[in-house]
Image (tube, rainbow, N blue to C red):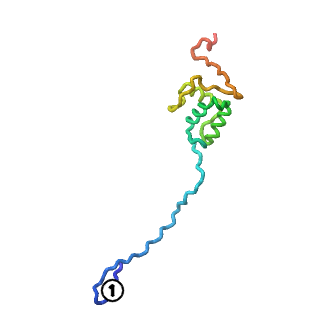
Amino acid sequence: MKIAKKSKKAEAVVVPVVEPKAEPKATAKKAKTAEPAKPSINKGKTTGMRVMQYQDHTLSIQHKRKLSDEALAKDWREEFPNAKGRFDAAIVAGVRRLFNAGKHGTQQIDPPKDGVARYEDGKPVAEKARAKKGDDKSQAA
């Protein structure tokens, strides 16, 4: 702070002198640009749903779409291009089996009473019944 004197007769008056502040230094941070968000591993590209939620959704509307397992797998791969797991017809069959049993995840919607059918060329395909362990028919004599 500097002291300014008015005149010889007057007493010294302290007048604060305000010095201009230094301009802020340029920072190394760049301004955020409006870039499209990178698709997440766990969130869908178009829906924003998580993987299990999207799988349940597609199976719940499968009676309308009537896609084959290969087509469903392709749909899942397109929705989750960065997913670490694989999506193929065998995975679709397993997810459908769990979905029909009501065991696909903790937030699964209720499956239809008849279950979700497998489709080929837009027509439902009957699933073969699996033999259970310990069943007499599954053991060779």
Where residue 89 sits in the image (x, y, percent)? 66, 31
Residue at 54% of width from left, 30% of height from top? 104
| Secondary structure at numbered mark 1 | loop
Task: Determine which quarter of the picture holds residue 76.
Answer: top right
**Mark 1 neighbour density, 10 Å: few (under 14) some (14–19) many (20 or more):** few
Where residue 108 sits in the image (x, y, percent)? 53, 31
Q: Is residue 64 left or right of residue 111?
A: right
* Outermost residue toward the front in this view: 64
At label 1, the amino acid type is: Lys
Q: Is residue 34 above or below residue 122?
A: below
Task: Determine which quarter of the picture holds residue 63.
Answer: top right
Residue at 33% of width from left, 85% of height from top? 5
Say which of 54 and 94 sits in front: 54
* Outermost residue toward the bottom in this view: 8
Residue at 62% of width from left, 18% of height from top? 129
Number of numbered discs: 1
Residue indicated by mark 1: 6
Q: Is residue 69 above or below residue 34?
A: above
Residue at 35% of width from left, 79% of height from top? 2
Q: Is residue 14 left or right of residue 136?
A: left
* Outermost residue toward the top in this view: 141
Where residue 118 sits in the image (x, y, percent)? 65, 26
